[in-house]
Amino acid sequence: MLVHLALITWGYAGGRVTAVPGTFWTLTVDYPGMLLALAGTVCLILVVVTSVRAARSRLRHESWHLLHLYTVKDLGDGSRLVRSLRPGTRVLVEGPYGRLTARPRTRDRVALIGAGVGITPLRALAEGLPYAPGDAVLLHRGAPLFTAEFDVLARERGLQVHRLPGPRRAADSWLGDGAGPGDDRAVLLGLVPDVAQRDVYLCGPDAWSASVRRTLAAAGVPASRIHVEKFGW
């Protein structure tokens, strides 16, 4: 797109490099709608730049979130109507709702447990929640996601990260085959010995989350401190 704009300007300038700046100014200021088009182009470029993983890892969540694009799933009459919105329509966005926010938190220490793309809201919590070094621990089941971002949080804020890759070690287990010996409760307590004294945020597929909840209950975590959201798409 930028190359296209440059070539158009160069063409209007008659191929004279020295005339390009003046031609660009004339096109932008004098032609109808060009200022708005320029503003839209700048916003689009900012969205692309702030969507690059390397850039996001160096920006605060609030900085790039304001320029990010949203996807709405068709789940009913209301969400289906989003496709009929015209460009320029004012939109009011509310939330977040559910349990994966700071509102239900009761303890200084937290454990974040997610599977697959269910790690996405937990990543936002890991960035946004206040906690001292060592007071937040993350357990991620599945292929690595947001590795660079979590490495930065581990280095700068003391987030403890435990990755649990590999296929399930058993049909009734939520752990990967590299988790080591012992039942799920023993492995969990080996990774987070004080889990019963923490708030636990959990996000993943229903069956997997149910298995984690059973393990948390067996480890002594009260149901009131297990904050669950399913992540389906």
Image (cartoon, grey):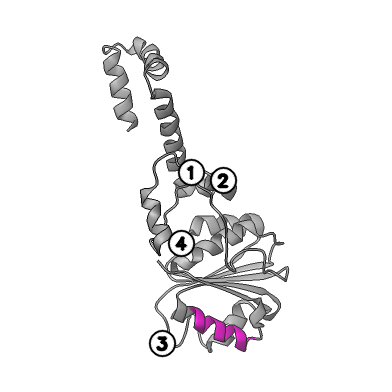
Within the image, what quadrant is residue 218 found in? bottom right
Secondary structure under badge 1?
helix
Quadrant where the C terminus sits is bottom left
In the image, the segment drawn in magenta is 209-219
Cα–Cα gap, marks 3 and 2: 40 Å
Report if residue 4 lies within the magenta region.
no
Amino acid type shown at disc 2: Leu
Residue under label 4: 145
Secondary structure under badge 3?
loop
Secondary structure under badge 2?
loop
Cα–Cα gap, marks 4 and 3: 24 Å
Of the two numbered discs 1 and 4 on the same chain, state the one appearing first in sequence.
1
Q: Position of residue 36 (x, y in %)?
A: 43, 28
Residue density around tag 3, few if under 14, some if 14–19, many if 20 or more, within 10 Å = few
Instruction: Determine if residue 73 is in view.
Output: no
Label 1 or label 4, whichever lies nearer to me, is: 1
In the image, what residue occupies the spot 61% across and 81% down?
A: 190
Name the disc covering residue 59, or none.
Answer: 2
Residue under label 3: 171
Q: Position of residue 81 (x, y in %)?
A: 39, 54
Q: Nearer the viewer, residue 16 or 8?
A: 8
Q: Position of residue 116 (x, y in %)?
A: 44, 69
**Circles 2 and 1 in contact, beta carbons < 8 Å:** yes
Within the image, what quadrant is residue 105 found in? bottom right
Quadrant where the N terminus sits is top left
Of the two numbered discs 2 and 1 on the same chain, state the one appearing first in sequence.
1
Instruction: Determine if residue 39 is in view.
Output: yes
Cα–Cα gap, marks 1 and 4: 18 Å
